[in-house]
Image (cartoon, rainbow, N blue to C red):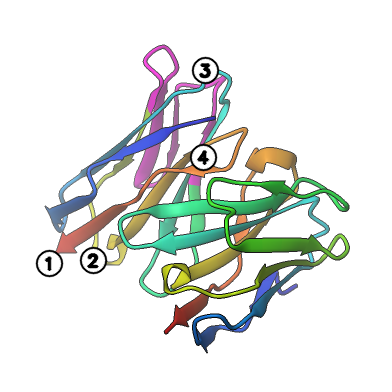
C-alpha cells in the first residue's frame, strides 16, 4: 500500500517568515495530494490540494508544489501569522493514507 | 447542512466494556472512513466503506468492527475495550472512493479506556 512520509514533525518560525513542510509518497499511481490543517482540539480541514496534472497551486499565502518524478510534494506558507499555528497533514490518494503530521508554531 | 456528525464527543470506558461510536453525514457521500489519532502517529485508518453495503479493513483494524447501516451512517464498535484503544477517533466522508476528493471530518470522539 501507499506510504507517506512527512517532515519535519515540528517547526517553529518567527511571525512573518515562511514555513515549508515536505512529504514523500511511494505509489506512482497516486494522483491527488491534499493538505489538511488541524487546530488544537478541532477536526482536520482541507486547506489546499493538487492533482498530478499540475506542478504548483497557490491560494493567497499558501502554495503546494508537486514533483511527480521524485514523488514528493510540499506545502509553503508565506508571511506566517500566529493563526497559522496548527498541525498540518499531507495525504496521497487514491487511498486514505496520511502523513504523521507537522506541528507548526508561529512565534510572535 | 451539518456535514459529518459524530457521537459521543467524550467517553470513558473500563477495560472489557463495549461501545459503539456513531457517525452520520448529510452530504450524500458514497465513502466513509474511521481513523484514530494518537500523538506523533498522525491519522491511521481503521476501516472504510467505499459505498453502501461494503466495508474493508484499513491499517489498524484489530479490536474493531464496523457497520455501514445505510448511505448516511457508518458506526464503529469496540467489542472489548483495551487501554491501547485510548485515542481520538475521527469519522470522515468523501464523495468519491479512496479519498480521491476532499475529506470532511466529524468533530472527533475522545475515548479513554481505564
Q: Name the residue under label 2.
A: A82
Q: Which of marks 1 and 3 is in front?
A: 3
At x 41% / y 11%, what residue is drawn?
A69
**Do the residues bearing badges 2 and 1 touch, measured as CB atoms within 8 Å?**
yes
At x 65% / y 73%, what residue is drawn?
B79
Q: In the displayed structure, would residue A46 be above or below residue B39?
A: above
Q: Do labels 2 and 1 share a chain?
A: yes
**Bounds of the magenta span?**
A48-72
Of callouts 4 and 1, which one flags the residue occurring earlier in the amino acid sequence? 4
Q: Disc 4 to disc 1, how far (Cα)?
A: 28 Å
A22 relative to B71 in the view: left or right: left
Q: Mark 4 points at which residue?
A: A49
Q: Nearer the viewer, mark 4 or mark 3?
A: 3
Q: Mark 3 points at which residue?
A: A28
Q: Nearer the viewer, residue B97 or B64?
A: B64
Quarter holding residue A42: bottom left
Of callouts 1 and 3, which one flags the residue occurring earlier in the amino acid sequence? 3
**Which element carries disc 3, helix, strand or loop?**
loop
Q: Are marks 4 and 3 on the same chain?
A: yes
Amino acid at each position: 500500500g501507499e506510504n507517506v512520509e512527512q517532515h519535519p514533525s515540528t517547526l517553529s518560525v518567527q511571525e512573518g517568515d515562511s514555513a515549508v513542510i515536505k512529504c514523500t509518497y511511494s505509489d506512482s499511481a497516486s494522483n491527488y495530494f491534499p493538505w489538511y490543517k488541524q487546530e488544537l482540539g478541532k477536526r482536520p480541514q482541507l486547506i489546499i490540494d493538487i492533482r498530478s496534472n499540475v506542478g504548483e497551486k497557490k491560494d493567497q499565502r499558501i502554495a503546494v508544489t508537486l514533483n511527480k518524478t521524485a514523488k514528493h510534494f510540499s506545502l509553503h506558507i508565506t508571511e506566517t501569522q500566529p493563526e497559522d499555528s496548527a498541525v498540518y497533514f499531507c495525504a496521497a490518494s487514491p487511498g486514505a493514507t496520511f502523513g504523521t503530521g507537522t506541528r507548526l508554531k508561529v512565534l510572535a | 447542512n451539518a456535514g459529518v456528525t459524530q457521537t459521543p464527543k467524550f467517553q470513558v470506558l473500563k477495560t472489557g466494556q463495549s461501545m459503539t461510536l456513531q457517525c452520520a453525514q448529510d452530504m450524500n457521500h458514497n465513502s466513509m472512513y474511521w481513523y484514530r489519532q494518537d500523538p506523533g502517529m498522525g491519522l491511521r485508518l481503521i476501516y472504510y466503506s467505499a459505498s453502501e453495503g461494503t466495508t474493508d479493513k484499513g491499517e489498524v483494524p484489530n479490536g474493531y468492527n464496523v457497520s455501514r447501516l445505510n448511505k448516511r451512517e457508518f458506526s464503529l464498535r469496540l467489542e472489548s475495550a483495551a487501554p491501547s484503544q485510548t485515542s481520538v477517533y475521527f469519522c470522515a466522508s468523501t464523495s468519491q472512493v479512496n479519498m480521491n476528493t476532499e475529506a470532511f471530518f466529524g468533530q472527533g470522539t475522545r475515548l479513554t479506556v481505564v
